[in-house]
Image: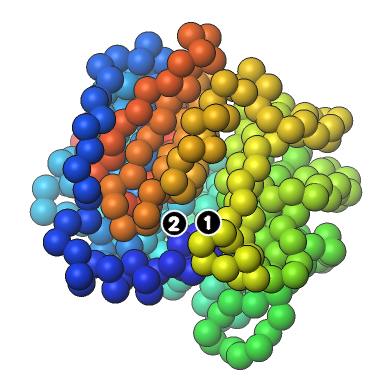
Amino acid sequence: MSKRFLISIFTVIACLFVSCSMDPADDTEMPTESGSGDRLLVLCEGLWGLDNSTISYVDNGVLTNGWFKQQNPGMHLGDTGNDIIQVNDTLIAVSLNWSNIIQYMYPNGKAIAATEDIPNNRRLATDGERYLFCTSYANKGYVAKVDLVTKQIVATCKVGYEPEGIAYYEGKLFVANTGGYSFQEKDHQYESTISVVDVESMKELRRIDVGCINLYGTMSQCGQFICINSAGDYYDTKPKTIVLDMSTEKFRVYDFPATYNCVYENRFYLIGSEFSYSSGADGGYKYSVHSIDLPSMKEYEGFGKYNFAVETIMQMQSPYCIYISPYSGHLYVTDARSYATNGYLYEFDPEKVEFTKLKLQGLNPGHVVALSRTSYSPEK
């Protein structure tokens, strides 16, 4: 659930009571097969408090909406899907922020278990073996460590206010703290730190002060490097991008936002959405696209071989997620539109220099993950 989404939430909810349809007429044609071979899960957040998170499934360009519900008749995914990751070849984890649970399922969509009692949970990371880690806004900000065998919380660690992105690297967690947001305690300031946590002891070792506030949103990881968005204060402090080398704990700051970011072949790809209340409700958002090479940390304007996609992205009403499949190299970008209508998924093929567009039946498609090509579901 993005802060941009939160800014609009009360307006959106008001609109729902006066609107007969949340999805205006659309003549978009569905493509058949894309040739990518990708099997994608698209997590649509839904609207906070309405228990309408959904997962759509895309198999080589063929879309199945309401996929999770089809695989689990009579079951709702939950309220406000905030993150989704593939833990290993047999397990998918989804954090559901307002339902206060982590839902687990096989790659075929069958729900198998849940971890409860992580209120206001946010982002997920894993060591790929035994443990899952989840950030939470509750109790002034902490990280929960979950045993993937029992699905139980085995330890927690206090970090900064409103922790967001989280990454695992060589026995440590790197947690981006946000601050300035919680209703639990008035008037606390925006955070500008990344907490470093020892996984074995679940103790905070130190905080890295990057000098940029409000470290909010998606965190992409490429080996030892992480890309973090600094959203600023939505008034005078402008957003930034931070790239941190977790092996040395040295970082570089860039003068553009990384609101939505992903990684592919040692390069970060960023869609920046800069908002300022000072610019007014109608002209407050400014978009940008950049890429950053690794390990040089050299920045570029545009998307390199995906530059053909930039014009289409800039014409979207509300870009909301960017993802590049590690298997096909196809670029995927979602459009949340008005935040109260069904979103779109765009697929860009860099070889054919063309795109297709899929109409989702879900609100605020904020997360895309490609299932590994060795994924399977254990027989019972």
Residue 273 % position (x, y): 60, 51
Residue 60 % position (x, y): 33, 19
Q: Amino acid at mark 1?
A: Arg
* Residue found farthest to the bottom: 186
Q: Is residue 189 visible?
A: yes
Q: Secondary structure at mark 2?
A: strand
Q: Amino acid at mark 2?
A: Asn
Number of numbered discs visible in the structure rendering: 2
In 3D space, how far apart are the residues under numbered discs 1 and 2 (Cα atoms)? 7 Å
Query: In this figure, which residue is indicated by the disc labeled 2?
Result: 82
348 with respect to 301 (left or right): left
Q: Quadrant of residue 116?
A: bottom left
Residue plotted at (43% across, 67% down): 8
Q: Is residue 134 visible?
A: no
Residue plotted at (22% across, 48% down): 24
Check contact, mark 1 vs mark 2: CB within 8 A: yes
